[in-house]
Image: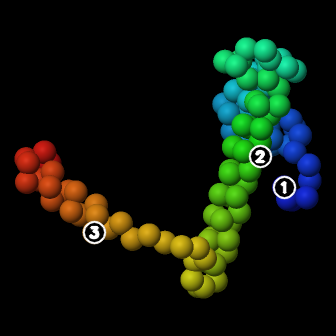
């Protein structure tokens, strides 16, 4: 999907790219009232906005993954910020071992 295409129900469903997510989205959007006087019942635009946000994050993640794969295939450094948590994980494992957990 290109960023300049407007979001629609079809575009969101395509971006979700998972049958279970698509069914959940379609179920929610089909049950959403155009307007809701009840604050506990999201209206159509709230449901649409929620799923648009999910679809946007999935699109961004797919794009980052594609860029990382392309960089790795050509031997270039993988773009983006990395956080090395190896030491944190090793410390947590040591604490668990000290308590006899693992």
Q: Position of residue 54 (x, y in %)?
A: 69, 43
Other-residue count near label 3 (Cα within 10 Å), few / some / many at <14 / 14–19 / ≥20: few
CA gap between label 2 and label 1 equals 8 Å
Q: Is residue 23 visible?
A: no
Up/down of 83 relative to 97, above or below: below
**Residue nearest the observer in this picture, 3 or 45:** 45
Q: Is residue 74 left or right of residue 91?
A: right
- The residue depicted at 49 percent of the width and 72 percent of the height is 82
Q: How many marks?
A: 3
Q: Position of residue 79 (x, y in %)?
A: 61, 76
Where is mark 2, residue-wise? Answer: 15
Q: Nearer the viewer, mark 3 or mark 1?
A: 3
Q: Is residue 13 visible?
A: yes
Q: Secondary structure at mark 2?
A: helix
Where is mark 1, residue-wise? Answer: 1
- The residue depicted at 60 percent of the width and 85 percent of the height is 76
Q: Are marks 2 and 1 in contact (CB under 8 Å)?
A: yes
Q: Nearer the viewer, mark 3 or mark 2?
A: 3
Where is mark 3, residue-wise? Answer: 87
- Report the quarter where the N terminus lies: bottom right
Q: Position of residue 75 (x, y in %)?
A: 58, 85
Other-residue count near label 1 (Cα within 10 Å), few / some / many at <14 / 14–19 / ≥20: few
- The residue depicted at 63 percent of the width and 70 percent of the height is 69
Q: Is residue 56 left or right of residue 64?
A: right
């Amino acid at each position: 999907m290109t960023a300049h295409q407007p979001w629609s129900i079809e575009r969101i469903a395509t971006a979700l790219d998972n049958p279970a997510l698509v069914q959940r989205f379609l179920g929610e959007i089909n049950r959403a009232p155009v307007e809701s006087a009840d604050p506990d019942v999201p209206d159509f635009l709230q449901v649409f906005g929620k799923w648009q946000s999910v679809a946007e994050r999935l699109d961004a993640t797919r794009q980052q993954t594609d860029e990382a794969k392309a960089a790795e295939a050509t031997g270039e450094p993988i773009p983006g910020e990395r956080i090395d948590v190896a030491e944190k994980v090793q410390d947590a494992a040591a604490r668990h071992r000290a308590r006899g957990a693992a």
